[in-house]
């Protein structure tokens, strides 16, 4: 026990000598803070290892930490692989459903259209962008076909049509002033 304590004190003395030398060799004072933090962490590590060695449990503690760390890494990898796999499956599923929706649109006589499909958990929703006007009969056939072939009800299907043959989503406002009006010209007029 005395030998362990004397080696511990010797190691701490050597550490403080090296610590002082390193601080003196730092070229710029702005780096001194980082060196002190690093050396403080080393000191904490040394004290913990020495205390565990004195208790006789350092190898057991390291082995247990290593085992738990490896198990956690394995769990994280499995979870990441599962999430990645489900992401790619959902992406391909969305593409296939989009193809089916485009076929349904063609079969109902709607040629100028596009679709977007979203899968969130168990919920399947679709957005259909029309570039032409459709009749109520076509809309009814479309909704029936979506329900029968894909199980997409009216509440999960959004049909977006535009009066000028352009999609309304993402286009500029056609009426009124934009929210970012020409304030610079207003300022110039006032001056």
Image (cartoon, grey):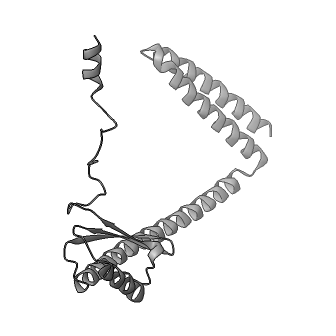
Q: Position of residue 138 (x, y in %)?
A: 29, 81
- Front-most of 56 and 111? 111
- Looking at the rendering, which quadrant does residue 73 occupy? bottom right
Give above or below for 140 relative to 82.
Answer: below
Q: Position of residue 142 (x, y in %)?
A: 33, 82
Residue at the bottom extreme of this rendering: 148
Residue at the right extreme of this rendering: 1
Residue positioned 67% across, 59% down in the render: 64
Give above or below for 41 relative to 153.
Answer: above
Left or right for 38, reference 49: left
Residue positioned 22% across, 67% down in the render: 131
On-image quarter of the N terminus: top right
On-image quarter of the C terminus: top left
Residue positioned 35% across, 74% down in the render: 94
Left or right for 180, reference 132: right
Q: Position of residue 119 (x, y in %)?
A: 43, 71
Q: How many marks?
A: 0
Left or right for 169, reference 164: right
Q: Position of residue 169 (x, y in %)?
A: 31, 57
- Front-most of 86 and 146? 146
- Front-most of 151 and 94? 151
- Looking at the rendering, which quadrant does residue 107 occupy? bottom left
Residue positioned 47% across, 20% down in the render: 31
């Amino acid at each position: 026990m005395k030998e362990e304590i004397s080696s511990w004190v010797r190691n701490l003395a050597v550490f403080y000598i090296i610590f002082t030398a390193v601080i003196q060799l730092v070229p710029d004072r702005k780096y001194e803070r980082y060196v002190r933090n690093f050396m403080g962490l080393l000191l904490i590590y040394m004290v913990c290892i020495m205390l565990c060695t004195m208790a006789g449990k350092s190898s057991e503690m390291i082995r247990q930490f290593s085992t738990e760390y490896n198990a956690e890494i394995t769990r994280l990898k499995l979870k990441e692989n599962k999430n990645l796999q489900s992401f790619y499956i959902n992406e391909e599923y969305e593409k296939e459903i989009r193809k089916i929706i485009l076929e349904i649109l063609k079969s109902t006589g709607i040629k100028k259209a596009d679709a977007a499909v979203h899968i969130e958990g168990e919920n399947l929703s679709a957005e259909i962008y029309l570039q032409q006007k459709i009749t109520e009969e076509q809309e009814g056939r479309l909704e029936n076909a979506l329900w029968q072939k894909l199980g997409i009800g009216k509440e999960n299907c959004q049909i977006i049509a535009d009066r000028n043959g352009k999609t309304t989503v993402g286009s500029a406002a056609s009426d009124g002033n934009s929210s970012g009006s020409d304030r610079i010209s207003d300022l110039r007029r006032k001056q």
